[in-house]
Image (cartoon, rainbow, N blue to C red):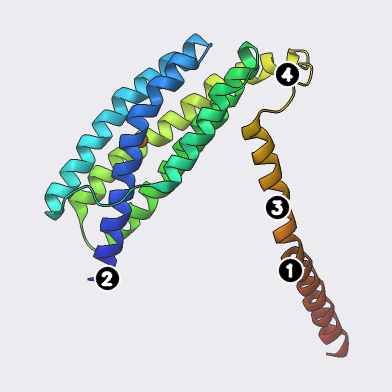
Amino acid sequence: MALMDVLIDELRDMYSAENQLVKALPKLAKGAKDATLKQLFSAHLGETKGQVERLKQVFAILEKKPTGQHCGGMEGVIEEGKDALEKDEEGPSFDAGLVGAALRTEHYEIAGYQACISMAKTLGLRDVAGLLTANLSEELAAAKKVTAAGAPILKASARQPEEPKKPKTGKEKYSAQKSREDEKKAAPDLKKGSGKKTGSAISALMNRMVG
Ligand SMILES: [Fe+2]
């Protein structure tokens, strides 16, 4: 069944993502300055280990092995988290970067589980959908808790004076260069897109006037 193959691939992606997070979350917990944030990351590490176990149960039900696919998406998101951990910011501003990084990982997982649950339900795999829903609920709750813990951190960060600009590191220079390239590459398509929209809006208006 084609959808089953897609689901297995997606699940292997999630399994890889969760395993990557088992390694990344202690670094976030260690790096966080705010005690609540620190505690949240540690607590979510415990949950993540349980999520890996649930995914193993899913693969046992499906009689498939859990490995076979590395999640490049989560690798990228974690890489951005590492950037946040390397930032030379003071207290709340440093933590504000971690809040952003944590929310990205949570929402990446939320999207992944939602897609897998829809597929499992379509295939009539109720036990699989149930286990995945348990993981999804934890991710949704974690994202909510990080958002709540983040609110006072962002406020404190907003009160911090702006730091004097430091010279960019090699990595930051490379990233800035790549972002300019992204903009440049998209520019012709952006022009096309907006032109088309205006064009169709004008023709719709003309049709209405003629009609
Ligand atoms: Fe997770």
* Residue 207 position in % (x across, y down): 82, 86
- Dot 2 surroundings within 10 Å: few (below 14), some, or many (20 or more)? few
Marks 4 and 2, how far apart in space?
A: 50 Å
Q: Which residue is mark 4?
A: 158
Residue contact at pointers 4 and 2, CB within 8 angstroms: no
Q: Which residue is mark 3?
A: 181
Q: Nearer the viewer, mark 2 or mark 3?
A: 3
Q: Which amino acid type is marked by label 1?
A: Gly
* Residue 33 position in % (x across, y down): 53, 11
For marks 4 and 2 on the same chain, the one whose residue lies earlier in the sequence = 2
Q: Nearer the viewer, mark 3 or mark 4?
A: 3
Image side of residue 189 versus residue 59, left or right = right
Query: Residue at image x 41%, y 31%?
Result: 141
Task: Say which mark, if any, is on residue 193.
Answer: 1
For marks 2 and 1 on the same chain, the one whose residue lies earlier in the sequence = 2
Please state, as top left, top right, bottom left or bottom right, where the N terminus lies in the image.
Answer: bottom left
Q: Which amino acid type is marked by label 3?
A: Glu
Which element carries disc 4, helix, strand or loop? helix
Image side of residue 71 versus residue 90, left or right = left
Whether residue 174 is visible: yes
Marks 2 and 1, how far apart in space?
A: 34 Å
Q: Which amino acid type is marked by label 2?
A: Ala
Q: Which residue is mark 2?
A: 2
Which element carries disc 2, helix, strand or loop? helix
